[in-house]
Image: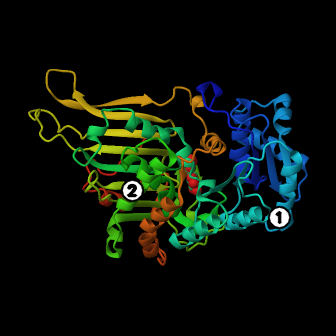
Amino acid sequence: MVTADQAIQTADPSNIVIFGAAGDLSKRKLIPALVRMMCCGLVHSDSRILGVLRNRSRQEWLDQLRAGLQEFSPHIEMDDDKWQRFSSCLKIVDGDLDDETMYQRLAESLETLGGTKNAMFYCAIPPAWYGKVAKGLRNAGLVHEDEGYRRLVIEKPFGSDLETASALNTELQAVFDENQIYRIDHYLGKESVQNLLVYRFANSIMEPLWNRNYIDHIQISASETLGIEYRAKYYDHSGALRDMIQSHLMQMMTLVAMEPPVEFTADAVRDEKMKVLRAVRRFEPEQIKKQTVSAQYASGTINNEQVSAYVAEENVSPDSATETFAAVRFYIDNWRWQGVPFILWSGKRMKSKVSEVMIRFRKPPFNLFDSHASVPAANALVFRLQPEGGIVLRLNAKKPGLTTDNEEMVMHAPYAADAEEVADAYEILMHDVLTGDRTLFSRSDEIEESWSIVEPILDAWKDRVSIERYRAGTWDIPDMDELTSDCVGGWHKPSIYD
Ligand code: BG6
């Protein structure tokens, strides 16, 4: 949890308007984050939360939120007094998103409530509605920042390819200034992801090693044990490439590869990330087969439970060829990274849930201890992002005894001893919206550039009728060994403690 004693700025009072206030994202993420932020004074006590919803009374909404807190955030202590204090800030505006009068009523509510004119509009709704909501807000006179700020928050997916992403950007920018738009990539809100920047730019030992002269390759991965849950309608048109690689993992790649920004401000950081994306080598159609891997989970066992195949999930067609695992081998053609493969991969229903960045260094140039010893392994530096954040350094050390045989020594430094100290991504990101810090939000040009990079892969995969399978709960991905065959150490399958 972010705490006020961390000398973090308490945001000015604001009207926090949530479209889709009765939906899943609100219950699971937004309301728990706001509860914690209010409790520790990060959200000003004069702020209000206005839920836009349909066919529900305020009391029904409150009951639903409280039940959601118990179910999804049982660690948040919530007695009746605390709930009374929090819920007194909650108001509702009843109506449909395509009803112009709803936006008028919202404007009237904000007027009659008095107090601050600041407003954050959080779209916790399907992306198809973003443009309509923006126009509704404009027509109700809620976009101009004459007396207070007006900020629009949207969630991924930002389009499903380059064309739809730039159409969405154009639609939103016709209403809001780019500086008023906050595109959330929740990976950037994870403390352990931001810590990557601190490890890189607050430690002088990293920089001399951080380039093609010392690094063999980099693997950035997110493996999950979950399947697609209730999201088949979205996922079956998305797949792992769109869902994880184009967004979260490419964002992490930019943080790992970027040059030090001139200052830690939103545009200085995003300019450097953008330069990385511009330097990513474009794929020629004939290279795609060699530079990518895709596969889909078959049935299997995870944590001793039998799980069904992707094609047997509810609302998935039995002949779907959507990938639930994707890997792409990128190259960044610039002075620092020329020739270093960046292998990004992500899969559902894998053996364990681990996200990490592994930097594999080159092998020692010469084996001095070759009489008895095995060849020393190449060093690796692993940034573990989750489940438990931390850093792992793999070095070679002498085996105790009379020989100079060596063995790998693993040094592990956890990021935080107490998981409770680590703030949830949504607390960090909402606090940033309220204080106007756009550093951790994707800019429109980053979104379009990353879509343009993956577009040739989407084109190559779109008409396929069959796909390789892997057994759920395993690392048995056909072709991953081949994709990484010339990388020192090959495919790095993360395990919980290394
Ligand atoms: C979301 C994807 O953006 O990230 C999901 O749509 C995925 O499919 C999730 O499960 C992973 O997030 P985390 O924080 O659990 O790694």
Q: In this view, does 419 lie to the left or right of 449?
A: right
Image quadrant for the C terminus? top left
Tell me, yes or no, if residue 70 can be seen here. Answer: yes
SS category of the residue bearing label 2: helix
- Colour style of the rendered protein structure: rainbow
- Say whether mark 2 is within 8 Å of ligand 1: no
The mark that comes first in sequence, 2 or 1, is 1
Circle 1: residue type? Asp
Tell me if label 2 and label 1 are in contact, CB under 8 Å.
no
Q: Is residue 169 left or right of residue 265?
A: right
Q: In this view, does 338 lie above or below 34?
A: below
Q: In this view, does 184 lie above or below 129?
A: above
Neighbourhood count class around disc 1 (C-alpha, 10 Å): few under 14, some 14–19, many 20 upward: some
Residue 258 location in percent, x, y? 38, 49
Residue 491 location in percent, x, y? 34, 51
- Residue placed at 56% from the left, 63% from the top? 310
Question: Which residue does the numbered mark 1 point to in the structure image?
Answer: 96
Residue 275, disc: 2
- Residue placed at 83% from the left, 46% from the top? 64
- Residue placed at 86% from the left, 50% from the top? 111
Tell me, yes or no, if residue 307 can be seen here. Answer: no
Q: Which of 212 and 65 lies nearest the eye of the viewer?
A: 212
Between marks 2 and 1 in the image, the one whose residue lies nearer the viewer: 2
